[in-house]
Amino acid sequence: MHLSETVNTGFYFLAPWLVFFPVIGLLINWILAKPLKFSENMVGAVASIAAGASFIVSVLLAYSVSINHGEVMRWQLAEWIHIGDLALDWTFRIDSLSATMMLVVSGVGTLIHIYAIGYMHEDVRYKHEEGRFTRFFIYLNLFLASMMVLVSGDSYLMLFVGWEGVGLCSFLLIGFWFEMDTLARPSWANSDAAKKAFVVNRIGDFGFLIAGFLMFWHLGNSFQFDNVFEAAKSAPPEIIIAITLFMLVGVAGKSAQIPLYVWLPDAMAGPTPVSALIHAATMVTAGVYLITRSFPLYDLVHEAQNIVAIVGAVTALFAATIAVGQYDIKKVLAYSTISQLGFMVAAVGMGAYVAGMFHLITHAFFKALLFLSAGSVILGVERGHHAHAHHDHHEEKPKKKLGKKKKEEDEHGHGHDDHAEARRVEHVETFDPGDMRNMGGMRKTMPVTFWLYMIGTLALAGIFPFAGFWSKDEILLDASLHNQTVYWLLTVAAFFTAFYMGRQIWMVFFGEARTDASKHAEESPKIMTIPLVVLAILSVAGGALNLPFKGFHQLGHWLEYTLGAIEYPPFDLGVAISSTVLALIAILISWLIYGRNPMKSNQLDPLKKPLSFIFTGMENKWYVDEIYNFLIRQPFKKLAAFLADVIDWRFWHDFVHDTVILGTYNWIGQIALNQYADQKGIDRFFNSWADVSNWISANVRKIQNGFVRSYALSVLLGVVLILGYLIFK
Amino acid sequence: MTVTVDYYIALSAILFIIGAAGVLIRRNPLIIFMSIELMLNAANLAFVAYSSIYESFTGQIFVFFVIAVAAAEVAVGLALIVEIFKSKKNINIDEMNSLKG
């Protein structure tokens, strides 16, 4: 409807290139990288430029939205499905909401692409699989393309295409090192994690699909956003509740909410840039985007909204408590992500869409920063571990400075390969570079990463004036006005957030190195730290996007174009101060426990004794996986075994097929048809004719006895007979 | 006693029966040939006799044909007998039964 009038202003015609650029990038890397022998930097550059081009398009589209005063813009690329009244096209929807998501996805995505060049360069070498470097970037670009389809689609079905596309990329990238576990030992642990993510997401997608079917059936036979929202106004509320709640199942799957969050911690099996891009900054926020996009539906039914908010808030607290008991640096961040996604879902559940989106953006910044810094830490430890392991093998050599040694090793190039196998057997097996208990004191060895990590931590903990403070405060403010339960749950969750992040900082960066590897850890190269610096700046200043004072609320006003008029509750100093103070107290407590007396190597977690079984519960993720295993997987496996063994094999195969069908056919074929119809019926019938003619010929043959005189006698008798007849007739 | 045509007919029948009996009974092909000649000439006699009864030459002309055919038949037959004798050293008619069914 807006197509022809305003199409000339702005850069809307670029919309499809959001998807095309990453696709071109992946095609180049896919098809040309091998024959043209691209270097790793070349592959990375192609992928990063594709992502960057997508970001530039996003900027231009956002600019176009702003000069057109937020008018919703559609750009139809091609026809898709036309059946009867249903008309679905590949139409891109550019409004302030989708433009925001595009900017986040492509912006953070580009930085992570650049970071990944440095990260994967080392990762593929530690895993002795250098050929997979290109594959990683192909997957990353594919993910970016899918995510762009997701955020820019103009219908639920197109959104679903992107939704499944990112799910596929998530699967591929979690299982990137599919034949090993996180410690590079041969195992199927990583591919199991990938399968888990995929299967759990299928459960969520099932909910989303049901919501889609209901929508199509009851809301105007359409998937197009505006049509659905228009039809929803006159639809019975029960239908809307059903749709929104089924959609919540989808959200719970993709955005890792209770009860479907279990896949996200396991998803840390993927390389760290994947954890940052897909499982922290972009894909997992798709659920939040979906609810925000469907705000006209959710606004109609407050019961569903409440459920969404409670699910989010409970998830936020639940995951935060688990994060306290984790030892793996990425697992802590994974549970933190689940917790923060809970914040966002709670916010959009309360109708505070701006706060939810705001937190989505800032979270993308600081959680990407944290994950990438964690990746830097892990690689630093790994470098230290390898350098040290190398030392052991060459003790007869004069000891050199580590940096030099590393360089020398790179120059000669064969250093890694010579001892690759030996290391695999002797060291890598038992050493986990991601375990925080193996770290300690790393602020000295990795100063840049340390400061970046600090910024991310402060932003996540919600310390003034970092980005996380503003967005989290806005959510808490809305919660304090709309829903007290959610407010308290989120406040406690925020306390835990600050606590586990403090614990992590003290354990990783302070105290003394607990292993030789962390003692010899080395700082990451510039290609990894520079994107981190950009993210750090955004994490510091991101709050300026939406300052909660009169005259600001920039993000709110920007999203108003899409979300309609929004009321801005006045900034509540009480909420802000109380959450900040709580966060500071939590960090202080974490210092008392972990900072004042740094953990020694092989020491138990200081919380383990005083909290006894509670901490054991946290350590073991409250046994949710075990409960699911017991309640769902085992019965399911038994059911599957029953179905396979008894129903399928014994009943269908052995009984129905082998006995009944095969037996019947055998009986019909061998007994009825062969033995009776053929042998006794048809055969006998024709054989008897053959016997008759045989008999006749046997008898008649006797006449032809070869005696000429008997023939002559026959002739005589014949003549006599004929003559007799002629005479006496 | 006048000799009427009936006598010729009767003589013809007797000759024919003697010839037929000779064909059926004797084993020597030469005798069989002679018997066949006898039967043919019995027929010739009947032709001639009826020819005089009906005062028609047709019968007599038939006789010429029969005599000619008989001569040819004897030529072929004797040639066959000579060849059979050459190969089998024997002309017993009963042993020439290789076409037995």
Image: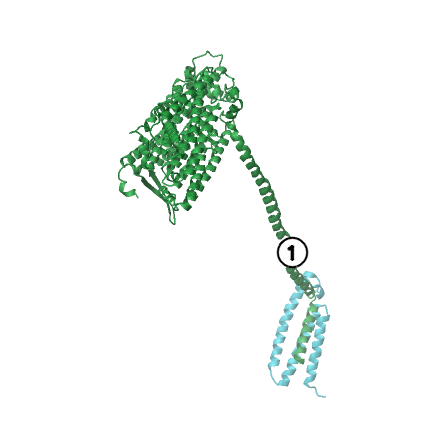
Chain colours: A green, B cyan
Q: Is residue A45 visible?
A: no
Relative to A153, residue A623 above or below: above
Q: Which residue is labeled 1 in the image?
A: A676
Q: Quadrant of residue A638?
A: top right
Q: Is residue A509 left or right of residue A655?
A: left
Q: Is residue A657 left or right of residue B31?
A: left
> In the rendering, at what x and y percent does residue A43 appear?
38, 29
Task: Say what amino acid the circle numbered 1 marks.
Answer: Tyr
Specify the quadrant of the image occupied by residue A705.
bottom right
Q: Is residue A262 visible?
A: yes
Q: Tell me which chain the residue with mark 1 is part of.
A: A
Instruction: Out of A389 and A654, give the one closest to the viewer.
Output: A654
Q: How crowded is the residue under tag 1: few (<14 C-alpha within 10 Å), some, or many (20+)?
A: some
Q: What kind of element bears circle 1?
A: helix
The vertical placement of A715 against A64, above or below, is below
**Residue located at (69% from left, 71% from top):** A714
**Quarter occupied by the C terminus of chain A:** bottom right
Q: Nearer the viewer, residue A165 or A611?
A: A611
Position of A667 relative to A403 (above/below): below
